[in-house]
Image (spheres, helix red, strand yellow):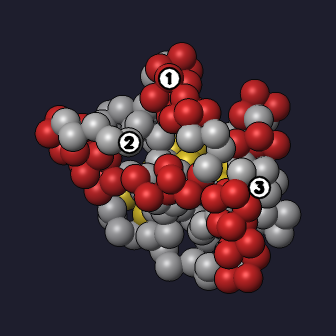
């Protein structure tokens, strides 16, 4: 997080520009197989797959999320990144807080091991303080979905993260 690498800064900028926006609602058909969803901002479709299985450990890394999606790499991808979006029990996008997904530097399609090193290890080093990570890799709300969780709950989560 304190790295001042020009390469990393350029990669992060490219990554955030090229990744698809999170859908405002979890597409339930994604539970069974990958889905293709249009992204109006990018002007093309992206493929997504469910990222809610036991190996994802939502109970640890996104504790208020019920479902998560991760964008899949394609031939049009200009980085090795993936968008990670998480949803509440009502299938609504978590736009902030401890359950929100955030962009991944490395897609699990490419390398689960490298994804763990570059995307999960910082969470561990921050001792689960998601607010520090969200400063660098903010949860995506490119479709202007309703803020979720509500302000009072979000502020309580933020206080809890700071006091952990």
* Percent coordinates x, y for residue 33 in the rendering: 70, 39
Against 58, residue 138 (above or below) is below
Can the viewer see residue 5 in this picture? yes
* Percent coordinates x, y for residue 84 in the rendering: 56, 48
For mark 2, give the secondary structure: loop
Label for residue 32?
none
Label 1 crowd bin: few (<14), some (14–19), many (20+), radius 10 Å: few
Q: Which residue is mark 1?
A: 117
Of label 3 and label 1, which has the lower sequence position?
Answer: 3
Instruction: Tell me what residue is drawn at x 50 percent, y 69 percent.
Output: 141
Q: Which residue is mark 2?
A: 1
Specify the farthest residue to the right: 89
Label 2 crowd bin: few (<14), some (14–19), many (20+), radius 10 Å: few
Instruction: Tell me what residue is drawn at x 29 percent, y 56 percent.
Output: 17
Label 3 crowd bin: few (<14), some (14–19), many (20+), radius 10 Å: many
Q: Which residue is mark 3?
A: 65
Quarter the N terminus occupies = top left
Quarter assignment of residue 49: top right
């Amino acid at each position: 997080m304190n790295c001042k690498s020009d390469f990393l800064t350029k990669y992060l900028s490219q990554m955030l520009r090229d990744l698809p926006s999170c859908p405002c609602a979890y597409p339930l058909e994604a539970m069974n197989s990958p889905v293709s969803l249009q992204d109006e901002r990018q002007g093309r479709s992206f493929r997504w797959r469910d990222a809610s299985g036991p190996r994802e450990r939502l109970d640890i890394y996104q504790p208020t999320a019920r479902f998560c999606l991760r964008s899949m790499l394609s031939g049009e991808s200009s980085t090795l990144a993936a968008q990670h979006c998480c949803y509440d029990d009502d299938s609504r996008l978590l736009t902030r807080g401890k359950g929100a997904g955030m962009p991944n530097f490395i897609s699990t399609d490419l390398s689960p091991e490298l994804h763990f090193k570059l995307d999960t290890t910082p969470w561990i080093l921050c001792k689960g303080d998601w607010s520090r990570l969200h400063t660098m890799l903010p949860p995506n709300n490119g479709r202007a979905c309703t803020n979720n969780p509500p302000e009072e709950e979000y502020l309580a989560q933020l206080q809890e993260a700071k006091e952990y």
